[in-house]
Image (cartoon, grey):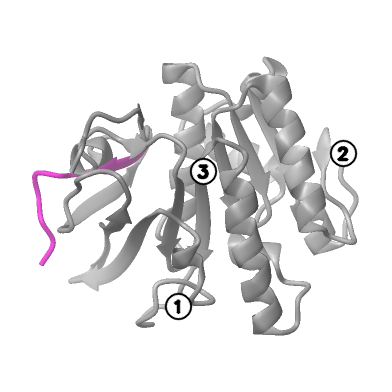
Amino acid sequence: MVEDIDRVRTGVPGLDDILNGGYPKGLVILISGGAGTGKSIYGIQFLYTGITKYEENGILVAVEERPRDIRRYMLGFGWDLKKLEDQNKLAIIDASAARLGIPSGEKYVEMRPFELDSLITTINKIVEKMNAKRLVIDSIPSLFLQFEHELAIRREILRLGSLVAETGCTTILTTEVEAGESRLSKFGVEEFICQGLIQLFMRERGNEMKRSLVVRKMRGTKHSTRRYPFDITPSGIAVFPGEEVY
């Protein structure tokens, strides 16, 4: 396998080691896991470190949480998202207001009726305006709550994969799975629209919960397929590639 490729640093200590240097540039990567595994933090850490360490502007599509809550939560890691927004290095698109049926005072808002094409148009405009290189959509299940039939959801997810790839950004999408489920994503199709897939796990060991991850696929690069522990520290997520989970 050829390894002379452009890479994008993940921003997560230890994860680049597993990925042989980082994500291949321009890939669409799915982060899949249950509640509390850290999917949203992975995504925002990817954006924050991309801006502050690698000078790569980013876009967050906030579907699960309100932007004001995200800004407050991330201050706990020392990540001042508002400062980056004021510097026009980070854009947060509020797609949660429509889902919750509440007004939004955000600069970028996707209101009802939700249209995937409208969202992608907004993303493309921001990419051009900010020269954004990184994109995170959190999360896919919340993005398509208005659809009643799973067939329609799957069709829209397939469209999402194609449209997001056209932005040119290295993209992270998040999706949920229920604890104990054998499938890799909420709807069983998300993993097929992405070139990379990282699964997050959280299981009880003794009297505490332990987190781990495995890189199921990452197109265009060698990577470890072993399961490794990770933790959510005061400064963000850290993976421990020197350790294994059995």
Task: Give the x, y percent position of residue 103.
Answer: 90, 50
Residue pictured at 24% horizontal, 29% vertical: 4
Q: Looking at numbered disc 1 in the image, what kind of residue is underneath it?
A: Glu
What numbered label is drawn on residue 171?
3
Residue pictured at 66% horizontal, 72% vertical: 155
Q: Looking at numbered disc 2 in the image, what kind of residue is underneath it?
A: Gly
Closer to the camera in the image, 101 or 22: 22
Where disc 3 sits, the SS reads: strand
Quadrant assignment, res 102: bottom right
What numbered label is drawn on residue 178?
1
Q: Earlier in the sequence, mark 3 or mark 2?
A: 2
Residue pictured at 65% horizontal, 82% vertical: 150
| Mark 3 surroundings within 10 Å by alpha-carbon count, few (fewer than 14), some (14 through 19), many (20 or more) | many
| Disc 1 from disc 3: Cα separation | 23 Å
| Vertical side of 108 occupied by 225: above or below | below
What numbered label is drawn on residue 2?
none
The residue indicated by pointer 2 is 105
| Disc 1 from disc 2: Cα separation | 33 Å
Q: Looking at numbered disc 3 in the image, what kind of residue is underneath it?
A: Thr
Where disc 2 sits, the SS reads: loop
Residue 49 relative to residue 95: left or right: left
